[in-house]
Image (cartoon, rainbow, N blue to C red):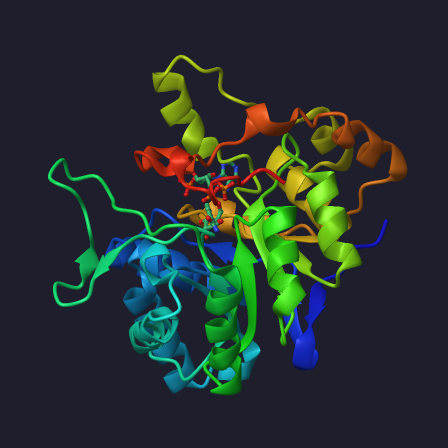
Amino acid sequence: MAAKIFFNLPGGLKMPALGFGTFDSNDETEVTVSLNTALEAGYRHIDTAYVYQNEKIIGNVLKQWFASGKLKREDIFITTKLPPQGVHPDRVELFMKKSLENLQLDYVDLYLIHLPIGFKYDESAGRVKVNEKGEIQFEGKTDHAAVWRKMEEQVDAGRAKTIGLSNYNISQIETVLKTARIKPANLQVENHVYLQQTALVDFCHKNGITVVAFSPLAAPGHNKFAEKFGQAAKELPDIIAKKHSKSPAQVVLRFLIQREIAAIPKSITPKRIQENINVFDFSLDDNDMKELKKLDVGEKARVVDFSLHKGIEKHPDYKVKG
Ligand SMILES: NC(=O)c1ccc[n+]([C@@H]2O[C@H](COP(=O)([O-])OP(=O)(O)OC[C@H]3O[C@@H](n4cnc5c(N)ncnc54)[C@H](OP(=O)(O)O)[C@@H]3O)[C@@H](O)[C@H]2O)c1
């Protein structure tokens, strides 16, 4: 089965099907070295977010690549995200501009709303509002239409080539679609061989919304965390990998891409950075795809859990399930 190397976005923009994730990496040396390794290996799609606190470091690396002439701005696809404290009509532009300043860019290729939930923000102190126990204060029900109108203004102003959503479910996407002048170009959600979310993916594809899978490896890093709490670690499938002389990680990434879902694996390990992009020289056959589809266990395989923000589950927009 063939796999697309790019997915088409509005305005003739091409999003590489395999990108570089950067969550949980904000040490200057670590980000600089891993991003340089990724760019040398051929990654041309970088995923970051205001909340990852690494936009400035990424911006510095890109600046050097542009200055050396090794890369032109239009050669690279950059995604960043509106943080939850920006999920309010009054603060979209503020945080878009902060991200561009950090990245030292005039525009991003894709600007996503990170979560459908807003955090209260103390503008004078420049930080999220917390109560006396240090717990985050949430905005009320999100006015999706009003926030989206502000996202559209970022496209009008040339700050974002395209805009999209992250961690939205079908009904939240439908709400946005109802009043959107510029349709969301992309949805970024957790998606991997154990959590395939076919209904959500089909809904997006039918509505012309591309899908990016975060935690595409079922986040082996999170396994260490899960094990601490007595949960079994998840092993990636290796029978199909052996058949193709590929690693299990390469198989599950290729599986996503053949499902027409882009993947943004994160790694700070040079060998793995190289390994994760080498998924275009083999192909999973129908039988492999069928076997891999059987590994879907649904919600219980979800690894990214926003309930670490105490009280979030009471928010009316806390329904991340597809
Ligand atoms: N929109 C959102 O809310 C959201 C949420 C989560 C993530 N994301 C984005 O998606 C990206 C990827 O998700 P993720 O970081 O959660 O999970 P992931 O990419 O599925 O897994 C990353 C973990 O897997 C390890 N790893 C990488 N390549 C490997 C390989 N070939 N074999 C074995 N282990 C490997 C990494 O270790 P080493 O680094 O030590 O090599 C790291 O611990 C993030 O970095 C971020 O950009 C977005």
Q: Indicate the position of residue 167 as horizontal and vertical percent values.
A: 52, 48
Name, please, the residue furthest toward the right: 286
Q: Does residue 160 appear in this view?
A: no
Instruction: Residue 161: tell me if it is visible.
Output: yes
Judge whether 26 appears above or below 98 on screen. Answer: above
**92 left or right, relative to 74:** left
User: Residue 193, percent across and down?
Assistant: 66, 34
Count the labels in the image.
0
Residue at point 27% right, 55% down? Answer: 120
265 versus 81 height, above or below: above
Residue 233 relative to residue 89: left or right: right
Q: Is residue 199 left or right of residue 301?
A: right
Q: Residue at x 53, y 76 (%)?
A: 152
- Counting from the top left corner in percent of width and height, residue 105 is at 39, 80
Give the residue furthest to the top. 230
Q: Nearer the viewer, residue 124 or 233?
A: 124
Name which residue lies at 35% across and 73% down: 103
| 212 shown above or below 208 | above
Look at the image and tell me in which quarter the C terminus lies.
top right
Residue 234 percent across, percent down from the top left: 54, 23
The one nearer the camera, 308 or 181, is 181
| Closest to the observer, 68 or 122 | 122
